[in-house]
Image (spheres, grey):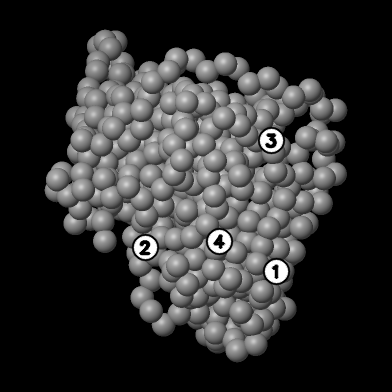
Amino acid sequence: MPKGLLPKPWHGEPVVVLNPTAPEVKVGQPLQLVCAALGVPAPHYQWYHNGNPMKHQKKKKLLISSAKLSDSGTYLCCAANEHGEHWTEAVELRVGTCLADQFFATDKVALLVGNNHYRHHPHLMAPVTDVFELSLLLEQLGFRVVSLLDLNKAEMLIAVHQFLLLLGKGVYAVFYYAGHGYEHSGRNYMVPIDAPQPYAPENCLSVQRILQKMQQRRTALNLILLDTCRKWYNPQCALSQVQPLEPWGNIVYGYATSEDAEAYEVQDGEFSAGIFMKYLKKHILQEKKVTHMLEDVLEDIGRDPLVTGKQVMEIKHTLKEARALTDPICTSRPIAELWGHSRELLKETLTFPCGIQVELRFRVVFSNVMHVSAKLQAPPPHIADVRLLLCRPTEVQELAMLSDSQSNQVVSLLASLYEQEDLDCVLRLCGLQKIQTDVRLQLDLHYTQLGTKQRACESLQKTLQKSLFAKLFSQKSWAYPPCLSSQGAAATTGPLDAPAVNAAQEGPCSLRAKPRHSGHCNSQSNTSSEPEENDESDLSSLYSALERAGLRQDCP
């Protein structure tokens, strides 16, 4: 044993004598990392990947028989015995991707939209959870994901446009929508949150129009996942014809339900989930052709007694190659950094005049939803009975209703993100795409001075620069100018309260399955031209308004 290896005095606690080093490894090849530690008794080991313990990696050697792209990341090992623990140095590992004998993507990009809080139609509950869970899974597969909640038509148009700009030859593209929707003559429509009641096709977005634009970008894989109803309630509405897609063999449709049927979500108090997402998240990480993966989802939904006879998934595709969502990324071109968002927790410590310190934490849950939390540090000995309040900024008061409407679902997600940390207060900032100015946070501190037994109050303000939202949201061009109000994007006539949607009969699990449709169409719409052609004119009008507002330079 080399002299000076063990500390003095030494009581048998683990001492790391061999740190892991990063080998060069490509997808499909075996991966091995090695560490070693001395200790009495002999230490046991636990490997960690990206901060998470690896369930079956509890020896000196970490062995993975066939490396995947998702195996890239940070590794370190903890050696521990009854006297303590010691950690190895962290090692950064990148799994190589360019193998000649398999398919690969030049990039992976995903846009997820969940519309929950409708102005004139029944609210939904599950899209919040469904979008959140799918975003985490796609990130594991190497996708750069933007996940958005509650968009009006103008915002949906901007989101889709920015999504299309990032697509190119060889890219894997995923578009997921959960919310109200319907199908008419083979064409699917997504209903924005500001769609009037009753609505017409021109108030909605055509999925096929988006898919045509995706295909024009020469992508290697276009996966469309529609978690919405496909039922048509008014045959008097204008018909539309579907323009044929190019025969390039790169299209996959995953419909949550079959034609002329409804898609259901299970509502159980604070937990809600779509039936489709319940089984998609079970299979999406499988290393198999994407259509085969979706077939596994279809079979599981077919066995669910809660929707037997009500919902059956449907798959349509022209995929001619055995491409999988798990395929590696291989590219020589620079990756655009303006898409996707980091879930990294940002922290900052503030000090009140009395000496009490508060740690502010900022976490992005969705690309347009951020949580600000505050945690009190130990107070000075002359202060007791401390209470901290986070005040909602005046700049986002109009978004408070949106935040409150998502309360139950967001609280559940928050608990999983913060791992039940003891936080003193949490503030949700929703609709970040609408915030056009700096935001001033105010913290109010109430406490008792032990010397005088008197209550005191102090306040601090923290200015959040607009650039902070741009950094977290990672898309400057979400700017939504005042001249483009929701009323300007689509008419909002009609009664404010839509009739309640009748729930399906309760299943054996005593959970309520409710369809994702609003059941209303404007029967007065008799235009003979294709109504979804308005997508193009609306987008042109939108960019004209952006230019007039001086914001067009942010839209490449």
Q: What x and y, as percent, mark residue 245?
A: 55, 63
Q: Is residue 511 visible?
A: yes
- The front one of 249 and 389 is 249
CB-based contact (under 8 Å), mark 4 and mark 3: no
**Mark 3 = which residue?**
262
Q: CA distance from mark 4 to mark 3?
A: 25 Å
- The front one of 483 and 351 is 483
Give the amino acid at mark 1: Lys
Q: Quadrant of residue 234?
A: top right
SS type, badge 2: helix
Labels 1, 4: front one: 4
Question: Which of marks 4 and 2 precedes in the sequence?
Answer: 2
CB-based contact (under 8 Å), mark 1 and mark 4: no
Where's the C terminus, which quadrant? bottom left
Res. 165 mark: 2
Question: Which of marks 3 and 2 precedes in the sequence?
Answer: 2
Q: Is residue 483 left or right of residue 108?
A: left
Q: Identify whether 196 is placed above or below 55.
A: above
**Mark 4 = which residue?**
244
Give the amino acid at mark 3: Glu
